[in-house]
Amino acid sequence: MVLEQFSERPWRWALLALALVWSGCLKSQPTQRLQQETSIAVAIVHDKGSELASVPAALETRIRDVLGKRNLVIHPISQPSFESIFLRKRASRDRFESLSALADDAQLTLLVETRAQYYSQLNGRYRWTVFVKLSMAKAGETTPGDTASFTIPVLLTFDHQREKEALANAADTIASKLGKEIDDFVAGLELAAATAPKRARLTTYEVGPMYFVMIDRFYNGRTDNDGEVDISDPQAFHGGDIAGLIAKLDHIAAMGFQTIWLSPIFSMRTEKIGEHGAFHGYWTEDLRTLERRFGTTEELLELRRALEERGMNLVLDMVLNHVGYDTKLVAEKPSWFHHNGDIKKWDDPVQMTTFDVHGLPDLAQENDAVYEFLLSASAHWIEVLQPAGFRLDAVKHVGTGFWQRYTAALRDRAGEGFATIGELYNGDPKVIAEGFAEDGFSHLFDFPLYFSMKDTFCKGQHLGRLAATLSLDVLYADANRLMTFADNHDVPRVWSACGGDDRRVRALLTFLLTARGIPTLNYGTELGLAGAREPENRQDMDFAADARFAPLISALLEARKTHAVLRAGKPRPLHLSSEHFLYLREGAKETALIAINLGQETWTPETFAKGVAGLNVLDGTRSKEFSVAPLSVGVRIYPNTDLSLDGGADERREIALRVQSDEEVRLVGAGPTFGDWEPSRGIKGTRGSDGFTTFRVALGANEIGVFKIVRQVGATTQWENGGNRYLFAKELSDEPLKPSFSEGDAK
């Protein structure tokens, strides 16, 4: 490479220092922000002797910032694509000519060449010289239309610091000079509209049925970026990457998914901690740069283009609560962290938000510098990639004040329709509803429904568990903003949770994919991947295996797409027993009837649609009969013109319940009616002389209540033996309730 060599004569250093000071005193020229987005192909080179070394993240970030401020949309050219050529061609002119062929449809091309060289020791510090050459041209030009060369003196503190640290130290100056050169170059240029313009600010949510990909476990598309791989070790890296996802994208698209949720792909700790591996990506180090073993920005942009060609979109996983173990940021910015040690009391709100989760250094998001760091990294990917939204990790471990501020800032940058999908790990609908109201999320994962589905479909509990969860939808402003799921990478695989019973898995998936909310499936669910715990639940995708659940998933996602009632209809219960649950979803033109049979015999429910032909969404047939096989879910859709419905009014009425008890008892359960499982707020009754206590419960006609009977013995609250009780106003019994208690707190 031809770079202007900086003389080692001392007087040259003095002149350079004087020039830098003088330039700082002059009035800076205004930034030339282009009126329209303009694409620019960028290659950043770090020459290190006979090899090309990696470019410091700090330098990449500063260059991106400079270009972004000028409305230049970056098309990064990755090092692997030019490395072999540039090692043979050392002259800048030859390199630029080769680079032009890699610029695709970009309107401008920029080559940034850097080299760092040790100079001398000065007063206990280490003096380095950074050499830089910039080359720029318009599209189609194979020789630079503008070049600039300069040198930057750098002082490093430690002997072990080398070329990479020198470049990082010079990043601000390089960026500043680059900005001035670009301003001079683009002034007066007449540029056509960008060939790959950004999508407009999102005004409506584009998140549809979502498929989660743990990138390392999905498919290895490039072996040259693998690093250390050991597929026999369940805690090691297995080589999956963005190129592999692109190669297998049609597999996901064929099932009908609209959105890909991608596990964290950012620079991260890659070494194990004890026996725990780092392959999952949640031990991040720098959210602004990609993890090399997962791919390049160029490949990420190619993924977005491939998704758009299929009418699909992308959600990125952002980890904002913590950084990875032993991350250098902890030493460099100690004030950015809480340093309180591990969480000991998981019900303590202070510990939950300011202590470490299993030793992961906890970021102090209330620190303005930390907030700006996290927001800047997030805004960078909105600028570069324009995803449909972010999945936001570990919500309950970050304070509400941060989420309010952060989600509002994202909407301001990307539009009101930018999806902020929070992982608020809690099974209480009240807590999830508060997360919507207080934190500003557009979507939250539906953990309450997940737990109730697992308990009923997999463990055989009373179907009132599921029905009561749906009844608590009244707590949400819009229950269709909930992201529903059968499992994820943090919990047992649904096939394992259901004991390896395909019938139970099919029933659960049928309910999930026809229920309110936006369904999310874990990679490999279509294959029936197993795994009861980590890391077994994060095993490799096997494209040679039989995707036995894929036809079911595909049929149901197609039904959701075709019939709006399966996307927006509100649930209304019609019948409930321990093994049977019948409910409908009513839309503007159609009504869906969903019948769950967890018994061992075929069930023919009594329905309002008797004698009317309904569409079976599983096989496309129409029939007036509606029978449901054991351990399965039946779904029929009827035109509203063929039905006579009562309108579904859910008027609240007072119901009288009698409990046989010789002592004072209360009814305590889910939702505000029953005191949100808090005994002191439960329903009090009126005790009679006949040994019965009468309770008057205000319940909606379509509401299913869940509760238990409790008594107070001294300072101890005792809960009745047995499972929860379920109350459905349409199916009341006149029989009094007869609780039994054991000594001690039986909750």
Image (spheres, rainbow, N blue to C red):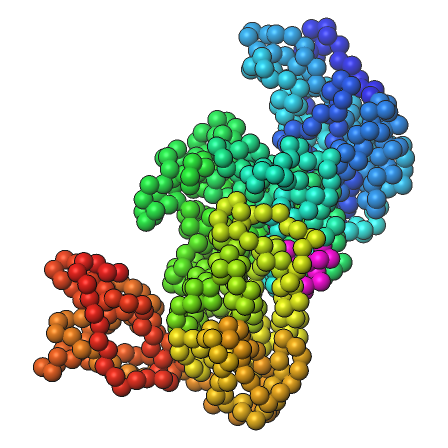
Asked if the magenta segment contains residue 393, the reply would be no
Q: Which residues are magenta?
A: 249-262
Position of the C terminus, as image quadrant, is bottom left
Q: Which quarter of the figure has residue 698? A: bottom left
Which is nearer the eye, 23 or 711? 711
- Residue at position x 37%, y 45% in the image: 352
Q: Is residue 308 visible in this depiction of the protein?
A: no
Whether residue 626 is situated above or below residue 708 in the rendered picture: below
Q: Which quarter of the figure has residue 188? A: top right
Q: Is residue 451 visible in this depiction of the protein?
A: yes
Which is nearer the eye, 35 or 437? 437
Residue 20 x, y percent position in the rendering: 67, 20
Residue 415 x, y percent position in the rendering: 60, 57
- Residue at position x 62%, y 22% in the image: 165
Q: Using residue 402 as the reference point, say whether residue 384 is left or right of it.
A: right
Whether residue 83 is situated above or below residue 102 in the rendered picture: above
Q: How many marks?
A: 0
Please identify the residue farthest to the left as the structure is shown: 689
Residue 109 x, y percent position in the rendering: 81, 38
